[in-house]
Amino acid sequence: MLVRHDLRYALSSPRGLLFLIFFALLWGWGFYKLAGGAAEDLGKGQSSLLIAWLFDMKVLHLVQERPPTLVAYFVAATWLAPLFAMLGSCDQTASDLGTRHIRFLIPRVGRAEIFIARFLGAAILVTSAQLLAGVGATIVTMIASSGDRGDIVAFGAQVTAILMVYSLPFVALMSLVSAAMASVGLAMLVGLAGYVLLAIALSALPLEGTAATIIPLLLPSGLKPHFHQPDMGPALIAAAACLIYVAVYAVLGWQVFRRRDA
Amino acid sequence: MADALLETKGLVRDFGDTRALSNVDLTLEAGPPIGLVGPNGAGKTTFFSVLCGFLRPTSGTVQVLGRPPLHRDLNGRVGILPQDAAFVKGVPVASQLAMLAELQGFSRKQARAEAARVLDMVLLTDAASKAPETLSHGMVKRIAIAQAFMGSPELVLLDEPTAGLDPATATHIKNLIRSLERERTFIVSSHNLDDIEELCGSVVILDRGKVVENRKVADLVARTSCLTFRLEADAPVGLDTKLSAVANVTRVELGRPGERKLAVHYRDGGGSDGGANATQIAVLQALAAAGVAMLEMSRGQSLQDRVIEITRPAS
């Protein structure tokens, strides 16, 4: 019931609409560019050097083995997914706590139900947006590419599923941040700024050996390279790791939320 | 034996180094409305919030209808009007009330009917489709009151129910409480002691985190054994001695400088000997003899005066 109400509110509130409009505008523009076949020559000639330099050899292999338009969407979407997920899920329990709306709720429903409902509402909103974008990217790839349609649909489904799963840890991270901040604006600021600063700091650290393997995994964004491979094996392991991130962040978020005064 | 309406034992709530509630032991039984009053900083809001389950006690226990606050078994049995909770912006108030009713256990159809019923109770049927941010503060307050009346709660906790309401609406809300008080018990927290005196059968007075009185309002205001005066000027020096010399006068209280108040307590002989009337006349004569001019005189003390007197720091 709360999830239903939460979703209805998310789809009509300024914050929910802002997320959806921003998401739709960006991918609308991206699909418009991709539909013209702009990405079809990626991985060929000098562009392969650029891709190998910008990303790594795994991405280059992916471009060479899968439909390039869909790969271009996939790589861009994995970079943007954390930001969109955090933007779309910054208001989970923050409004309830900040405006004390929670005082109308808790005499009628448990805190756990509120926390889970708010998380599910945000997760459904964000993953639904990813699903629609994934369908859009698959259709655009069919238009732009002369490749086998069955292969495009299969890879489109894989990409979409990965992006949906990859978004979830960031929704869970925001459940922790929103419970801690009790203000939507502050939650958004702390979540987004914290993520960007941490990501920059981690990428700038001169890491070696075991530290180079483990420290990037402190954030779910460290899983990106495992998704950007033609093989499904590493992607499946990374997807499972995403669920572990979800569990860890959600448990921490719940611990903060359950202890807070209403 | 039936559970007490409300019971606290050794209740303590700290905010950092500040102790807001200090070992509060209190048992309240179902009955006429109960007022919860006290000066600013007395711990009234904290106590109310702990009773509602909004704040957790630092130590001690609270039982509401035999269960801890917010226990699942209390869903629908306790209605709460929080003072400063906001409704969700952009969502019609009827939808929000219906959602709360659904959470309370109503079916979707019943919830819509219940929302309409409680909106009608607070005379806001016309506002059903409006978003809360488009309504006045008083209207939002009435909607918050409406949600506290959903279902058939045995206990209704109201925090400042008439604050921010115009006199006509405040009267309507008070009449509403009066009309429902036989079916349920109200606990009303308010700074407006006239409202408390008008509505409540008993009152709990908090001061500096402790319960300093828990008595019937009628006993507290001592209608028949006190005269209260509002004076034109502060009482002259020695007036208390002069009034104490009047037969049957037991105590004289002078207001602080600038308060221009005077309360004279006396033994109420009752019966038919006219003792009380004679004492009152003697007090008035003594005042006239002392050259004290008054603006107003009333029998007994108002609850406000009593609360001020009880919670006044010892000098």
Image: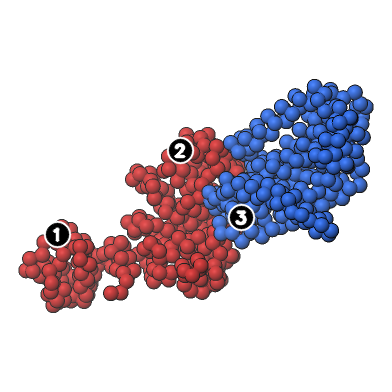
Chain colours: A blue, B red
Q: The residue marked by circle 2 belongs to what chain?
A: B
Secondary structure of the residue carrying tag 3 is helix
* Closest to the observer, A198 or B266: A198
Instruction: Tell me the mark number nearer the camera, choosing from 3 and 1.
Output: 3
The verdict on a common chain for dots 2 and 1 is: yes
Q: Amino acid at mark 3?
A: Ala
Secondary structure of the residue carrying tag 1 is loop
Residue under pointer 1: B232
Q: At x 92% / y 35%, what residue is drawn?
A: A65
Residue under pointer 3: A180
Picture coordinates of residue B36, whole percent (x, y)? 41, 62
Distance of mark 3 from mark 1, alpha carbons?
56 Å
Q: At x 31% / y 62%, what residue is drawn?
A: B303
Residue under pointer 2: B135
Q: Quadrant of the C terminus of chain B?
A: bottom left
Q: Amino acid at mark 1?
A: Glu
Q: Would you place residue A138 above or below residue B282 in this image?
A: above
